[in-house]
Image (spheres, rainbow, N blue to C red):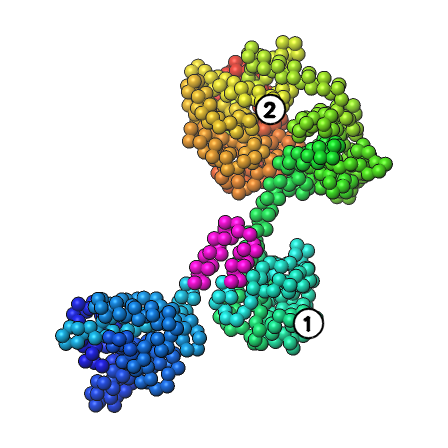
Amino acid sequence: MSTKLSHLGNDDADATARLMSASERLMSEAARLFPLAAAQNDRTIWLEAMIDEVPDYLYFKDSNCRFVVANRAIVKDNYREGLESLEGMSDFDIHPEHVARGFFETEQEIIRSGRPMLDMEELIRDSRGNLKWLLTSKLPVRNGAGEVIGIVGIARDITERKRSESLHVGQAHLLKMIALGAPLVEVFSSLILLIEAHVSDVTGSILMLAPDGKHIVNGAAPNLDPAYCRLIEGAEIGPAMGSCGTAMWRGEPVIVSDIATDPLWDDYRALVAPYGFRACWSAPIRSYQGKVLGSFALYSRTPGEPSAECMKLVGMATHIAGIAIERKEAEDSIQFMAHHDTLTGLPNRSMLDERVASAIEAADERGGTMTLAFLDLDNFKLVNDSLGHHAGDALLKIVAARMLACVRASDSIVRLGGDEFVVLINGAPRKGETVEDRLRAVREAVAEPVEIEGRSFQVTCSMGVAAYPEHGRNATELLARADAAMYRAKEIGRDAMQVFTAELANRAHEKLVRQEELRRALAQQELFLQYQPQMDLSTGRIFAVEALIRWRHPDRGLVGPGDFIPLAEETGLIGPIGDWTLRAACRQNKAWQVSGLPPIVVSVNVSARQFQEKDWVERVAAALEESGLEARYLELELTESLIMEDVQQAVATMLRLEQLGVTLAIDDFGTGYSSLASLKRFPVGRLKIDRSFVQDLPDDGDDAAIARAVISLAHSLQLRVIAEGVETREQMEFLREAGCDEIQGYYLSRPIDARALQAILCIPNL
């Protein structure tokens, strides 16, 4: 044997280095293990002892690929009696024909070419029937004449490594499925098949806990009989509900080694008997916070307990299943929130058009009608002001629940925002009932006394009604006319219901006339700006002004923005009006600088329509270039609600404005619904506390707490804070003590024209 090994050619020296160095180490070990052989210097005995102690396969084959020498490891794994039993045999005698054929062709290629083949991965099945992966190296053996007379091979069992690699690949694939939003049943099925591939003779199942936390819902069981799955669907978990129901009830693994005798299966033994299962090992699936979400189970047809390795795999499976369930719940929650009001759970504005379109389609199919009612709570602001916003929220939830109880399943209640709701009446009325009856029931339910925080009070509502097809052909027309009717209901004394009429159509015409007047005002320069100073509390210096638009109407005199900006927003005129305001403010600020006044910042409000225009940033740049004003002297005020309509797009636009050099501020902070996570992403420099939190300072404890919290939050985010609506010295002193950076309001100055402001700017400090 040693002579044959010595005939390895010089050309193969590099390829055989590892094999020979390992052999030398093993020879040394053999000398230690077999001192007698070493003493006798019998190299043949040494070599035989050495190769038999090697745990890897080590063998020599002749040119016909028949075994000449094979160590104990390969003989043992093939159940051959005696160490010489493989001699003279080939792979065709111990492996299936297709496997042996592959080995034979590889070895014949080595013999033909004289080139070794190293680190090949081969899959075999040993005599016990177990599949094994081998990492094999095969090298040619030459005689003294340099002729290849056979091969020497060494193979290491890498089955566990391959299993581990397969498991990691499977885990990565599962996590990718979860990240890409694959359906839960597909994720669960892939997870079960992965575990079944690594644990022999088991059948996997994933069950989920219903939202009520009491009942079982099938998740997936790709190799379990569907009939059995149907039998356990909807079962209630409990202290003796088989393996899975008990595991979910206890919140811990339940190992049943023999279903036939375990009392946990007393009530379900007959259920599982037809399927031949004798053992069931179940573990709860938990959320990240520890909440039980379901169970992962393995069924076996052989009684017994799982191995430690098996339970380790089950633990991995429950972890991945928990991630998948939580991801799906998060997606469902996001989807729900996108189409529903977070406070009341009602459909929101984004679903209104869809609901109205469906109702119109149903009305057309039956040749009938549908009714849309616009509802607004009367004096809701008084509830907020007297009891606080938390009480207002509680009232809205109560009202929403009452309205839902008054309508049928085919009807819809939609919350538009604030205290505004839409009621869609769909389907034919019941016998003896009218649409007016159903709407009256809604109004009466809203008006029932409400008790919040120990105080009982009553709210009413004003309702405007429009019907399809009489009053409109789509959601936009119907909503506009119901809205007009609702405003008429408020005008006639509130707590009323008004159906859209021709008179209201005339009012709509008047609205159109006002729209044309506003268009004329823009063209004939009837609009002008006033400016309200903003003061730094630490220095007393006027550092900025807010530009405020006014309308000098030829007939009605001075018109405030509250009387025409909503109309401009509704009709789309806010775009050109906003552009005019921006350009005029930039020109005036540059004019102040040219006159020698200290540079200040001019702050301009931005409407939602302006901000959403694709070329808005370019229009801001054009206004700066036209006026010659440096970008750092322009601040744009954005409202929370404007930003939160599309956070991703808003952040992109804000970053472009920041790159332009313009500073940004969030106006009316605290009245919108931005989250802290979103606020951190906004490249803004200032937060403006809304006047509603300032007007009752310092006496109102809630407003004081809110003001302090906003100031602290802003400073933690490296933002400055300005409070608007400051009218008294007491308010100013409170804000100064609370750490507020800047103020604006009547205490400092009312909005004034450019000339009057210029006089103020000449005063060093106020």
Nearer to me, 16 or 30: 16
Residue 15 visible in the current orientation: no
Which mark identifies residue 270?
1
Specify which label sits upstream in the sequence, 2 or 1: 1
- Residue most toward the right? 432
Q: Quadrant of the N terminus?
A: bottom left
Nearer to me, 16 or 620: 16
Q: As shown in the figure, which amino acid type bears the numbered disc 2?
A: Glu
> Which residue is drawn at the image coordinates 47% and 26% (left, top)?
615
Number of numbered callouts drawn: 2
- The answer to whether 510 appears left or right of 444 in the picture is left
Q: Is residue 407 above or below residue 479?
A: below
Q: As shown in the figure, which amino acid type bears the numbered disc 1?
A: Ala
> Which residue is drawn at the image coordinates 42% and 15% (left, top)?
594
Magenta run includes residue 637: no
Magenta run includes residue 192: yes
- Kindly report the secondary structure that dominates the magenta region of the rendered protein: helix
- The answer to whether 689 appears left or right of 657 in the picture is right
- Residue most toward the left? 145
Q: Secondary structure at mark 1?
A: helix
Q: Is residue 753 above or below residue 149?
A: above
Choose top left, top right, bottom left or bottom right for residue 19: bottom left
Which mark identifies residue 569?
2
Q: Secondary structure at mark 2?
A: helix
Highlighted range, magenta? 166-193
Label 1 environment density (alpha carbons within 10 Å; few <14, some 14–19, many ≥20): few
Coordinates of residue 587 in the picture (x, y in percent): 47, 17
- Residue most toward the top? 554
Residue 314 visible in the current orientation: yes
Nearer to me, 432 or 489: 432
